Image (spheres, rainbow, N blue to C red):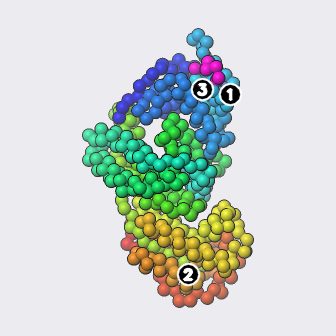
Amino acid sequence: MTSPSILEDQRSLIAFLSKPGVLSESTPHKVDTLGAVVFLAEDKAFKLKRAVSFRFMDFGNRSKRDNAAKAELILNRRTAKTLYLGLTPVYQIGESFHLGELSEEIDPALNAVAHLVTMRRFKDGQTFDQLVDAGELDSVLIDQLADTIADFHAQTPATCKDAAATSLTFSARRTAKDLLDAKNLLGENSTILVGKIEDALARYESEITHRGANGSVKRLHGDLHLANVARINNSPVIFDALEFDNDMATVDELHDLAFLIMDLWARNAHFLAARVWSRYLATNGKYEGLALAPLFISMRAAVRAKVALHAVEHSKGKDRESKLSEAKHYVQTALNALAKPKPRLIAIGGLSGSGKTTLAHALAPLLAPAVGAVHLRSDGIRKRRAGLHFNVKLPKSAYSSSENKAVYETLINEAKAVLLQGSPVIVDAVFARSDERKAIQQVAEQLNLPFNGFWLEADLIERQQRIVERKVDISDATPAVAARQENYELGHINWQRLNALESPLAVVIEELNLQG
């Protein structure tokens, strides 16, 4: 790792901004990052670009810092419009500084010595890394985040990037050099990791290039980890996009998402990682490129290892030991992500309220590293086919026999597409008809892959009670629907029957020989 070159002395400016009465009545709390000094005032946050130059980030002169400040404002208003208020110029006369008026633009006369990115401050403890550590990041928030990311990605125009594979390889090798330079600190794992990433890049070069040329590469967030998402008014808000290098942030959609997945996995939030992955994919039903996910996640973990190594260089004592341990953890996370998943098909059926989705969510992270199994829900497909958000209730016409047939056909096609990408799949639907159960089982048989079918059972009162207790869910089932299902002719069920009240997950884990 290389130390930054500090190209201008900003100490007097920082001292001015730190004074009470300048940015706030009291002394603001100052937070130092690699490229900025952030001042947290009463109801606002002000970010000053530091006069530093790294190999990967150059704020070496005032023009570069001003451009980065303006870019940060524009880029983050895509996802956090109400959070980013504008730019506050700072002027200097002799030895004195003073603040200008909040503006949308860089001072055209270029008299300002700095432009502070000015944000509305949110409550402390609300970033998603803090929520995970506090055990407050629940499934509702993570589903909302997956939907928010999917919407952002869908609304961002594609960048035709025929050289997507070349760009990705360049980025990987830049990180690899730093890891190899620190081999004496990281041990042999750094060499093993670099070799495995190189192999994966070569193996998937054509697919990466294909996706770049066909609209999957966009100017996205670029730094989408948990600390850059906040809970504001009980909804996730994505902020602090990578602003200083368009090339670094012009990435495959799955590579952008991979940072969040990796961060959850590295924090042992495996359930949430698998959930956000499947929810994101379900929003558009595009299951191409899934084989690239292990590579993308591994590369994100490698970058985190590199950042931790930089902190090692500038730390001492216990803090240095902690940062070195963190770097090693991310290297191991990167290696674990590259473990090849074993494709298999698991179908979970049962009448509404029997616990199919709960079981699928719990099972998914146990079936593959980093992202878990892809969880396909008939309810999600039905909403997508209707062009509606997952939480919008459908009319009765969406449950006609012809539409039911189309939903199950889509479910089968998507399961097949995911399996062909090498990922395990969990299919979650009522499967009330014997021909529906037979059709999904034939998918695995045709691909010569393992199949397990599980049928969940619970009495009507229990099923209705579970439906009533649901908070936010894709399913449109009501207690009345559950009652009507009691009259279904289910035919012979040759799947393994599970009592919904007797720890079905434990039974499935044992049946599949998994580690719970």
Q: Quadrant of the C terminus?
A: bottom left
Q: Position of residue 460 (x, y in %)?
A: 63, 80
Q: Establish if 439 lies above or below 157.
A: below
Q: Residues within 10 Å of mark 2 (few under 14, many from 20)?
A: some
Q: Where is residue 419 in the image (x, y as percent from the top left)?
A: 45, 69
Mark 1 vs 3, N-terminal side: 1
Residue beneath disc 3: 115
Q: What residue type is labelled 1?
A: Leu
Instruction: Check if mark 2's residue and mark 3's residue have beta carbons within 8 Å.
Output: no
Q: Residues within 10 Å of mark 1 (few under 14, many from 20)?
A: some
Q: Establish if 396 lies above or below 209.
A: below
Is residue 114 in view from this perspective? yes
Q: Establish if 389 lies above or below 95.
A: below
Residue name at image x 51 percent, y 78 percent: 440
Instruction: Check if mark 1's residue and mark 3's residue have beta carbons within 8 Å.
Output: no
Mark 2 vs 3, N-terminal side: 3
Whether residue 141 is in magenta: the answer is no
- Tell me the tag on residue 102: 1
Q: Residues within 10 Å of mark 3 (few under 14, many from 20)?
A: many
Element type at mark 2? helix
- Tell me the tag on residue 34: none
Element type at mark 3? strand
Q: What residue type is labelled 3?
A: His
The boundaries of the magenta stretch are 107-113
Q: Is the magenta stretch mostly helix, strand or loop?
A: loop
Q: Distance between the residues labelled 1 and 3?
A: 10 Å
Q: Where is residue 124 in the image (x, y as percent from the top left)?
A: 58, 40
Instruction: Check if mark 2's residue and mark 1's residue have beta carbons within 8 Å.
Output: no
Residue beneath disc 2: 436
Residue name at image x 53 percent, y 69 percent: 414
